[in-house]
Amino acid sequence: MFTDLIPGAAPQPAPEPTARERFFRLIDTALAARQLVRLTLGRYRGPEAGLEKVLARPVLLRGEPHLQLVWRHATRDITKNHPLAEVPALLDGLIATGAFENAHLHTRTQEAQFTVKTKGGRDRSLLRVGRASAPADDEGTDAAADTNAEEHNREKHRLLSLERPFWHDLGVTDAQHRLIPAMSRKWRQINRFVEVFSSALADAGLGGRDPAEPVRVHDFGCGKGYLTFAVHDWLAGQGRRAEVTGVELRQPLVDLCNAAAERHQLGGLRFDAGDVRDYTPAGLDVMIALHACDIATDYAIDYGLRAGASVILCSPCCHKEVRPQMTMPALLRPVLQHGVHLGQEAEMVTDGLRALLLDAEGYDTQVFEFISLEHTNKNKMLLAVRRRHTPAGHAEAVRAQIAAIKDFYGIRTQALEALVAARRPAA
């Protein structure tokens, strides 16, 4: 101690850098050398409700390098871009506060796993560094060779694998299991949907079910079966027994999907030709209906209710029923006189009524954008999870709200309300 003040004394060696210091040096070096591919902060322990992880990747904005952070919640993403000068303090704040207990850094040549640990009030964090083990990203391209990687604006998801041979049958990949460029947006949608699906299963208490007990899913208007195959594949990958049925009006698509399921021996996956309006109800855990046109969405939701689904997932489309009925309240007439505004209002009111009707039927319901508009303009998701307990009088209060909204807009009928009311015992 104080040997540097003693003439001729040997200088003391500098203390070894901590795991935290070494990890942040790796980040700084990767950013400076333009080698950073992505950074994931996980195992969130902070106070923000619904936040699961933060995903970071380099992007170019107006020719200047930035770090894009995606704050991933259970049902939404919040994206923020930061100049590189802000990054060290920002990341240090997220990790040093203990909000995130795990950080995973990918560069073009290395991977580093940092784990926050304390013992006796002292920092005992761990750092493991190795060679990059997965040079290919989820879209089948070599990350080290992709010089345009910084210009992508979304983290590529890893819930599903492009190696599954059925993706080639469905036209998503080529014979070498590489993503067909024209399908890149569809691939993002599929992965984002599976994220929402997995979170909803956990919220409904289905995630902790005995793996031997089947998870029963119906996907109405399944089209070419992208989501149907994805849900089955994800459930199987979780060690779950999946019973997944796609229902589609067009027989050629049903035949295509059944042939692919049989060819690859995907037990528990089948496709039926049918219409949601007269499909026979069966015991069900999850009802899916994406882009069902107009009141077909209402029939699908009603099917889920009749079948006792724990989770109902819809992405509504073509809101035609309510708009012709709507009268413009005097206060809103200057705004709604524009056709585009009236159409948007009709869409909002339609899906708002659906959410309230599900609430009255005993479901916790959310309406949110599940993927960016840059990938699809049909990006609204209606998610309903059956609650364990509904307070007395709650359903009646919600139905009174529905009646008031209909009266305000002059709406006479709404398909889902009529379907539900037809089954309700007479007072």
Image (cartoon, rainbow, N blue to C red):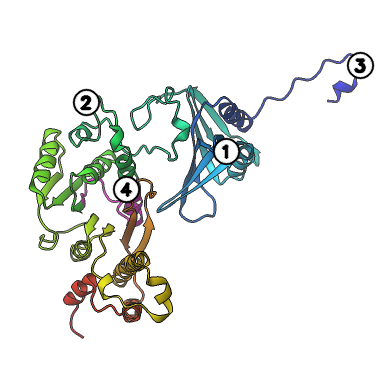
- Neighbour class for label 3 at 10 Å: few (<14), some, many (≥20)? few
Q: Which residue matches tag 1?
A: 117
**Residue 205 lies within the magenta run:** yes
Q: Which residue is mark 2?
A: 175
Tag 2 and tag 4, C-beta contact below 8 Å = no
User: Over which residues does the magenta segment extend?
Assistant: 193-216
Residue visible at 53% across and 46% down in the picture: 80
Q: Position of residue 339 (x, y in %)?
A: 34, 67
Q: Earlier in the sequence, mark 4 or mark 1?
A: 1
Residue 193: give its label: 4
Residue sitting at the far right: 7
Q: CA distance from mark 4 to mark 1?
A: 34 Å
SS for tag 1? loop
Q: Earlier in the sequence, mark 1 or mark 2?
A: 1
SS class of the residue under badge 4?
A: helix
- The earlier-in-sequence mark between 3 and 4 is 3
Most extreme residue toward the top is 8
Q: Quadrant of residue 132?
A: top left
Q: Closer to the camera: disc 4 or disc 1?
A: 4
Amino acid marked by disc 2: Ala
Select label 3 or label 4 by which is in front.
4
- Which mark identifies residue 320? none
Q: Along the horizontal axis of the image, is 392 left or right of 259?
A: right
CA gap between label 2 and label 4 equals 25 Å
Q: State whether residue 388 appears in this view.
A: no
- Label 4 neighbour load within 10 Å: few <14, some 14-19, many 20+: many
**Which amino acid type is shown beneath numbered disc 3?**
Pro
| Residue designated by label 3 | 7
